[in-house]
Image (cartoon, rainbow, N blue to C red):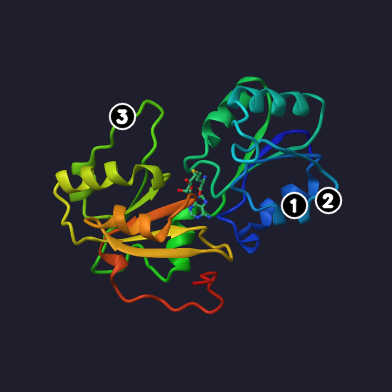
Amino acid sequence: MNAKVWLVGAGPGDPELLTLKAVRALQHAQVVMIDDLVNPAVLEHCPQAQVIAVGKRGGCRSTPQAFIQRLMLRHARQGRCVVRLKGGDPCIFGRGGEEATWLQGHGIEVEVVNGITAGLAGATQCGISLTSRGVSRGVTLVTAHTQDDSELNWAALAQGGTTLVVYMGVARLAQIRQGLLEGGMAPTTPVAMIENASLPGQRECRSDVRTMLEDARSFALRSPAILVIGEVVAGERMVLEGMAAAG
Ligand code: SAH
């Protein structure tokens, strides 16, 4: 495998949800730069590699994005095969696109390997089918956290008729509720708040738009968690053999 940077999705947490392509990239990697939402168990596929943690949680402060990018560039220019391992999918709220174009602009070859994004895995692990026929005509992935603190178009989301999957929402439940209610969503619309999706510590708090804030508090909901908002949450659930949900 030539020297280049692989932007690889590690999936939501369960190491078995890695793709074969991700495993192959890890097996060939000389340097692996790992984000903090990545389950370190996946490193069993790259015992040969130098592993660099660039996550935001481990230390007190985040590793600056520019520093991470320069580090990737340096290792790639030294001829090493670099894997940048990100939680879920690298291009779903993961800055994958940004990093790929920046590296390519510096003459580095880039390959992007999809991963299973947390929102999709979380719903499935709780038995929720996000696009149940006759209930939901689509699914919308949104982040509650924006760089400039601008608000989403909640009215469009509230009235769009799709299931909403909200990332990075734990600290913004009050704004999400307000936006949805003011946007015309029924207060009784069901909500599932899913913490540590696909991991042994997975937990689900069932609620609705009206009481989601209080329910999350009494449940002590913590990040990382996704919210699934829509009628599919209240529908009949799939019962999956070997579900990660521990209770
Ligand atoms: N690229 C990632 C998302 C990164 S943004 C992906 O595709 O999944 C970080 C947010 O993802 C978290 O705040 C949380 O909302 C969600 N997230 C990531 N891993 C999660 C997990 N195991 N369980 C629940 N939510 C998760």
Tell me if the residue at label 2 has its CB under 8 Å from ligand 1.
Answer: no
Helix, strand or loop status at disc 2: loop
Tell me if the residue at label 3 has its CB under 8 Å from ligand 1.
Answer: no
Residue 179 drawn at (x, y percent) = 22, 42
At 83% from the left edge and 50% from the top edge, which residue is drawn?
47
> Which residue type does callout 3 highlight?
Ser
Number of other residues with Cα within 10 Å of mark 1, as a class: few under 14, some 14 to 19, many 20 or more:
some
Q: Which residue is mark 1?
A: 43
At 44% from the left edge and 68% from the top edge, which residue is drawn?
126
State the image quarter where residue 178 is shown.
top left
Camera-side residue of 233 and 9: 233
The alpha-carbon separation of the residues under discs 1 and 3 comes to 37 Å
The alpha-carbon separation of the residues under discs 3 and 2 comes to 43 Å
Number of other residues with Cα within 10 Å of mark 3, as a class: few under 14, some 14 to 19, many 20 or more:
few
Q: Which part of the image, by quadrant, shows the N terminus?
A: top right
The alpha-carbon separation of the residues under discs 1 and 2 comes to 7 Å
Number of other residues with Cα within 10 Å of mark 2, as a class: few under 14, some 14 to 19, many 20 or more:
few
Which numbered marker is on residue 32? none
Q: Which residue is mark 3?
A: 150
Residue 190 drawn at (x, y percent) = 26, 63
